[in-house]
């Protein structure tokens, strides 16, 4: 198990790992809608499939950050974030992007199997199961645009720590907590100290993590947290007409405005090809007295069901919007 703050001597078995523990509260909410509970030990259960994504889907976080799925193939996912940075990475989120580009920097990464005295570590945690561990080497090559390249090598050690009941602005989820630690240097050593810790709370129901924590332990110590606020479906696609999109937005607004908690309402397109279900969940007020509602949304296109979770708050002219966008 990963235990933050306690160094374990693993000269033969691998490297030291730490537990990231934390909780967050969506800014301005009187209800604690973004807290996490302790991980509880549970019987191992396998999650076989890697996360899958639909191009155009937007993941919105309580901090105001967002990530858009730009393109997907069987081996990789291309992302665009709120700053306009692009990256291409594996469906396995425990590996950092294979390539990335911001306005000022760009770089690439390659990964290698970790070979130790008594055998090779598992390269990936998938299929996920409680207690499973993995390890790999990362070679990162990057540079400021117009500047010289820099290269560094690091070792990552990861573990599926256990089940966790997690509450974030988008709702309550059953998750598996996955944690990784990075050790910098040319080779691994049991005396090395982890320079970075990352933890994801992966929710199989949505094929994505709902909470993420990163702690960097270099000279500039900093902690980054993300809590899912909403998943926005892509509506500009085959089978959904312009008039359907207008009607779906009207239905979304009316449902948030008038529906009672726990009651599901449905909208059907005139062609019968598209259906949207909306269920209103918890209603609460932020500190500024803005009314917000958690919701669950199901989009059905030609019989295929897609489920989306989110929170929306009432703004000017009684229009409901996902906050912090």
Image: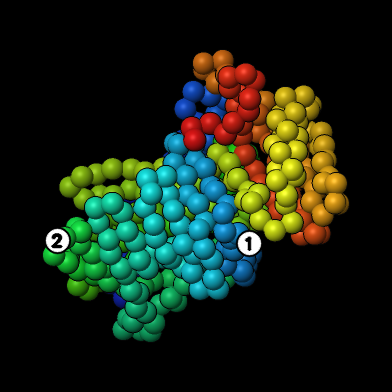
Q: Residue 154 versus residue 283: which sits nearer the camera?
A: 283
- Residue 305, position in %: x, y? 75, 56
Q: Position of residue 112 (x, y in %)?
A: 34, 78
Q: Is residue 311 left or right of residue 213?
A: right
Q: Residue at x 75, y 31 (%)?
A: 255
Q: CA distance from mark 1 to mark 2?
A: 51 Å
Task: Answer yes or no: is residue 233 visible.
Answer: yes
Q: Which residue is mark 2?
A: 147
**Quarter of the image containing the N terminus?**
bottom left
- Locate residue 145: give its quadrant: bottom left
Between 86 and 260, the residue placed more toward the observer is: 86
Residue 259 vs residue 7: left or right? right
Q: Is residue 77 above or below residue 163?
A: below
Find residue 239 and report its horizontal and vertical position in percent. Answer: 74, 56
Count of marks placed on residues: 2
> Could you tell me which secondary element the residue under label 2 belongs to?
loop
Q: Are dots 1 and 2 in contact, CB under 8 Å?
A: no
- Which residue is under mark 1? 43
* Residue depicted at x 62% and y 70%: 48
For residue 151, which quarter of the picture?
bottom left
Mark 1 and mark 2 lie on one chain; the one further toward the N terminus is 1
Residue at 35%, 74% in the rendered image: 111
């Amino acid at each position: 198990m990963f235990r933050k703050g306690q160094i374990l001597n693993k000269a033969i078995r691998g490297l030291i790992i730490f537990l990231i523990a934390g909780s967050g509260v969506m800014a301005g909410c009187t209800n604690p809608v973004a807290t996490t509970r302790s991980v509880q030990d549970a019987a191992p259960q396998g999650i076989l499939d890697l996360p899958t994504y639909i191009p155009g889907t937007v993941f919105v976080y309580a901090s105001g950050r967002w990530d858009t799925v730009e393109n997907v193939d069987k081996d990789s996912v291309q992302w665009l974030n709120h700053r306009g940075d692009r990256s291409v990475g594996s469906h396995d989120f425990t590996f950092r992007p294979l390539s990335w580009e911001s306005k000022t920097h760009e770089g690439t990464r390659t990964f290698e199997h970790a070979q130790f005295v008594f055998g090779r570590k598992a390269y990936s945690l998938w299929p996920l199961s409680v207690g499973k561990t993995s390890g790999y080497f990362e070679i990162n090559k990057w540079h400021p645009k117009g500047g010289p390249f820099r290269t560094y090598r690091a070792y990552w050690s990861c573990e599926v720590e256990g089940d966790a009941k997690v509450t974030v602005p988008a709702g309550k989820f059953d998750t598996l907590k996955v944690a990784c630690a990075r050790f910098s240097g040319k080779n691994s050593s049991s005396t090395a100290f982890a320079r970075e810790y990352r933890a994801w709370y992966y929710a199989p129901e949505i094929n994505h993590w709902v909470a993420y924590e990163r702690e960097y332990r270099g000279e500039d110590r900093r902690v980054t947290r993300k809590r899912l606020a909403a998943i926005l479906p892509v509506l500009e696609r085959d089978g959904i007409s312009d008039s359907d999109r207008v009607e779906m937005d009207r239905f979304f607004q009316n449902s948030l405005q008038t529906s009672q908690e726990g009651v599901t309402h449905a909208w059907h397109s005139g062609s019968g090809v598209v259906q949207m279900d909306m269920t209103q969940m918890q209603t609460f007020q932020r500190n500024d007295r803005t009314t917000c509602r958690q919701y669950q949304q199901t989009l059905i296109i030609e019989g295929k069901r897609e489920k989306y979770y989110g929170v929306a708050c009432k703004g000017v002219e009684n229009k409901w919007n996902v906050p912090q966008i």
